[in-house]
């Protein structure tokens, strides 16, 4: 900016002397005017002063012939209009300020100031012409803002008050293709935020409501369009003033900050309070943690032409004092911005999210407040498109709508520690694990995108929720993680065969890759726990509204009822076929090792007569082969096989050879025979008892006891979950085996296997579950 003064320039303003006296002692002719230093400066003083880092960016102009500086205190003809600056008439040598006639009369007409020496400026016709041009330009700008009105954008409950993008543009009263930026203001209640916006952008017109009363005049978020600077101006609710929905109102401020290009933090305190630094530091942390990712997703989801910057807005701290010096006045060698960064570090806050932080201060000796410095700083930042470029108003609305949809809902104040202005609870899912109480770490409303709940910590086991899941140990060792579910039967078993196997062998654990890896009562005695042998366990979180875990065959009773219905139907339709098959299988399960399995006996071992479905097969207790009734009608003791001294069925050949000792490797003692007998007796008694009980007791009396845990109870089902028809005596209720909701027959007549619930064979499912791809 500095340059050598040419001889031609000397003597252009012989009456204007340097007002700084920094390097010249006030004896040199003024060459520059620095508006921010509020002084005329000679060449040497201008150069020496602005070498300092904090003064380096000051705007200076070279003086022209007949130059008269602006009045320092006043802002317009009536002292209230921003933007119009009067030319000075005198300069007070004691106060070192330039004064117009009105400001001189107002500030120096009484007291000791009346005796201050002044230097009179002589106004030329050139200067009068310049003043008229300034007035004409300012009048045009003022006229452009005469019809501007503000409107409620978001209320105190975080609900957007404009219906859509077109309504937002209509209320802003701007063109849909107009590129604009967003300027918002924050600060404590009562610090004059609305007043600041009115005087900075709208020449003192009350576009945003102000009030002299104790009640807050701004509730919610209000917006207006400044056609001069082409910005959307947003006024926010003051901090420390709300008493209802405090958490939601505070979260709303960060949504506004996220869509802003420039943020003004207004403070009317003689010293900068810690609340300012904590607010901006916490806002920066929350912005990076929760909003950066969402803004990227919004760009992709909405297909925006202009990418939303993941770097936060620029911040201007507007500090007004009365009795104290401005920040940095007592540290000439340091710029205010460096002092602000030091305060952030001392408080443990790091505002990395903001693209820049600037300090603009003004000291008000006598009202009104000087907003001209703030206006110039704003205009300079608005011209900078390096990190935040102007965009259409529709893009601004989409971004606000996306953030409102994502981060919405009530915040329980009683469950929150207010150690931060923006705690994680404002933006993360509020669901808590029912088992351990851990909170979900995902952002709010993540379920709308199909993202499941997650927690940072591991869960603990609770018997009430039985929140263990099993994975196949063999598959895990091969690098695969395959979940397995305990159930009543294997997927290869038919319903009636599965019922019989469950009565004898208990529940099974089946892996899709390895098949059946465990049966709970396979060996009756000494059976090891599956956790020790074939499966790994993992404790998982239990989230509200999610399905329970299928452990310990919790649908066994319902499968028993379904199986009994199926068996009764099979017996009537297929005669004795199913019961014969069940008997044959059960016999094989408890048979001695030397007996030939029923499935391999196709004909009598003696007469070769082929067995039909209804024919009974008999095992010889001596040789173990299968015979018809006529070829095995004789009995004799077979103690060498462990049957004791009592006569048992043998075939004709073994009866004839009763005096010949059988070639048995090791004869079983009486205890072994007793054990076999006990096995047979228990099997027959338990199996027949279960069948008789299920048939004798009406199904309606045991349905509640048989219902799986995830089924909705009958008394809570009043309407079909799909078509909403009301249930009556004529309209029966049916449960979908996948989701557990109640449906009418028309809405649940599809049949499909539900292996995740333990139903490996086609069972009743509703329309919605049947449409789902993949395995249920």
Image (cartoon, grey):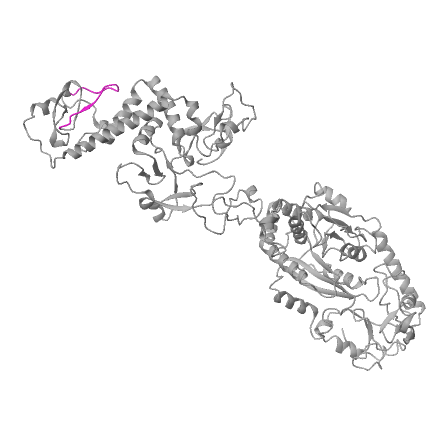
- Which residue is depicted at the point 64% across and 68% down? 342
Q: Nearer the viewer, residue 52 or 273?
A: 273
Q: Is residue 417 above or below residue 38?
A: above
Which picture quadrant has residue 114? bottom right
Residue 175 in view: no
Count of all numbered marks drawn on residues in the image: 0
Residue positioned most to the left: 659
136 in relation to 609, above or below: below
Q: Position of residue 135 (x, y in %)?
A: 89, 60
The correct choice, above or below, for 136 with respect to 96 in the image is above
| Image quarter (top left, top right, bottom left or bottom right) of the C terminus | top left
Q: Is residue 725 left or right of residue 639?
A: right
Q: Where is residue 545 shown, x and y percent of the image?
A: 52, 39
Nearest the eye: 547 or 377? 547
Residue 618 included in the magenta stretch of the image = yes
Residues rendered magenta in the picture: 607-622
Give the residue displayed 75% in from the left and 76% down from the top: 49
Position in image of residue 562 (x %, y %): 39, 26
Q: Is residue 146 visible?
A: yes
- 775 sits left or right of 589 in the view: right
Secondary structure mostly seen in magenta is loop
Task: Determine which quarter of the picture holds residue 350.
Answer: bottom right
Q: Give coordinates of residue 148: x percent, y percent.
A: 81, 49
In the picture, the quarter occupied by the N terminus is bottom right
Locate residue 633: give its quadrant: top left
Magenta region includes residue 121: no
């Amino acid at each position: 900016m500095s340059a050598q003064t040419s001889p031609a320039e000397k003597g252009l303003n012989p009456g204007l002397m340097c007002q700084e006296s920094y390097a010249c002692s006030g004896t040199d002719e003024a060459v520059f005017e620095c508006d921010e230093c509020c002084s005329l400066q000679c060449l040497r003083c201008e150069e020496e002063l602005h070498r300092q880092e904090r003064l380096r960016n000051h705007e200076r102009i070279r003086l022209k012939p007949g130059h008269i500086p602006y009045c320092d205190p006043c802002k317009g003809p009536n002292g209230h209009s921003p933007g119009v600056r009067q030319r000075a008439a005198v300069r007070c040598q004691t106060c070192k300020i330039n004064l117009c006639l009105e400001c001189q009369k107002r500030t120096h007409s009484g007291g000791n100031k009346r005796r201050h020496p002044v230097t009179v400026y002589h106004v030329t016709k050139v200067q009068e012409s310049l003043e008229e041009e300034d007035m004409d330009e300012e009048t045009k700008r003022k006229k452009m803002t005469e019809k501007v009105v503000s409107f409620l954008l978001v209320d105190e409950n975080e609900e957007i008050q404009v219906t859509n993008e077109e309504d937002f543009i209509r209320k802003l009263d701007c063109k849909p293709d107009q590129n604009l930026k967003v300027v918002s203001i924050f600060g404590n209640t009562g610090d004059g935020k609305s007043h600041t916006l009115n005087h900075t952008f709208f020449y003192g017109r009350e576009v945003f409501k102000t009030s002299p009363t104790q009640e807050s005049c701004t509730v919610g978020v209000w917006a207006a369009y400044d056609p001069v600077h082409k910005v959307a101006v947003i006024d926010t609710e003051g901090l420390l003033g709300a008493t209802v929905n405090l958490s939601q109102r505070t979260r709303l401020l960060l949504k506004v900050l996220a869509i802003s290009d420039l943020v003004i933090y207004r403070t009317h305190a003689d010293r900068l309070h810690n609340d300012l630094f904590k607010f901006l530091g916490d806002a920066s942390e929350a912005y990076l943690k929760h909003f950066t990712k969402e803004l990227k997703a919004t760009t992709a989801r909405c297909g925006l032409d202009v990418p939303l910057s993941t770097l936060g807005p620029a911040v201007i701290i507007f500090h007004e004092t009365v009795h104290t010096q401005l920040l940095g006045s007592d540290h000439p060698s340091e710029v205010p911005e460096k002092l602000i960064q030091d305060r952030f570090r001392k408080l443990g806050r790091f505002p990395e999210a903001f693209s820049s932080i600037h300090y603009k201060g003004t000291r008000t000796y006598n009202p009104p407040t000087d907003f001209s410095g703030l206006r110039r700083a704003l205009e300079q930042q608005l011209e900078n498109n390096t990190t935040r470029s102007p965009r259409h108003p529709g893009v601004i609305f989409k971004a606000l709508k996306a953030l409102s949809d994502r981060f919405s809902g009530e915040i329980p104040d009683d469950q929150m520690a207010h150690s931060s202005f923006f705690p994680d609870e404002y933006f993360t899912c509020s669901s808590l694990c029912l088992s351990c109480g851990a909170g979900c770490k995902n952002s709010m409303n993540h379920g709308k995108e199909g993202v499941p709940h997650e927690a940072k910590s591991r869960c603990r086991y609770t018997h009430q929720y039985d929140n263990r899941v099993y994975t196949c140990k063999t598959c895990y060792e091969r690098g695969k993680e395959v979940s397995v579910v305990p159930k009543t039967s294997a997927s290869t078993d038919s319903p009636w065969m599965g019922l019989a196997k469950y009565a004898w062998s208990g529940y099974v654990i089946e892996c899709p890759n390895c098949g059946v890896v465990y049966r709970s009562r396979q060996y009756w005695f000494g059976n090891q726990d599956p956790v020790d042998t074939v499966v790994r366990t993992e404790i998982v979180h239990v989230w509200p509204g999610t399905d329970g875990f299928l452990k310990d065959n919790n649908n066994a009773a319902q499968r028993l009822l379904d199986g009994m219905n199926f068996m009764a139907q099979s017996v009537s339709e297929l005669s004795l076929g199913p019961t014969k098959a069940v008997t044959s299988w059960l016999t094989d399960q408890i048979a001695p090792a030397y007996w030939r399995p029923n499935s391999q006996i196709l004909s009598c071992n003696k007469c070769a007569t082929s067995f039909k479905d209804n024919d009974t097969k008999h095992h010889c207790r001596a040789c173990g082969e299968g015979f018809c009734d006529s070829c095995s009608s004789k009995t004799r003791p077979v103690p060498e096989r462990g049957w004791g001294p009592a006569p048992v069925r043998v075939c004709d050949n073994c009866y004839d050879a009763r005096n010949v000792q059988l070639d048995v490797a090791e004869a079983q003692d009486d205890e072994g025979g007793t054990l076999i007998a006990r096995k047979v007796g228990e099997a027959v008694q338990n199996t027949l008892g279960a069948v008789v009980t299920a048939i004798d007791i009406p199904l309606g009396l045991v349905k509640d006891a048989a219902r799986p845990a995830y089924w909705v109870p009958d008394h809570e089902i009043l309407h079909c979950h799909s078509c909403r028809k009301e249930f009556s005596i004529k309209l029966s209720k049916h449960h979908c085996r996948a989701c557990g909701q109640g449906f009418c027959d028309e809405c649940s007549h599809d049949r499909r296997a539900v292996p995740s619930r333990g139903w490996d064979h086609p069972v009743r499912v509703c329309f919605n579950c049947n449409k789902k791809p993949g395995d249920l």
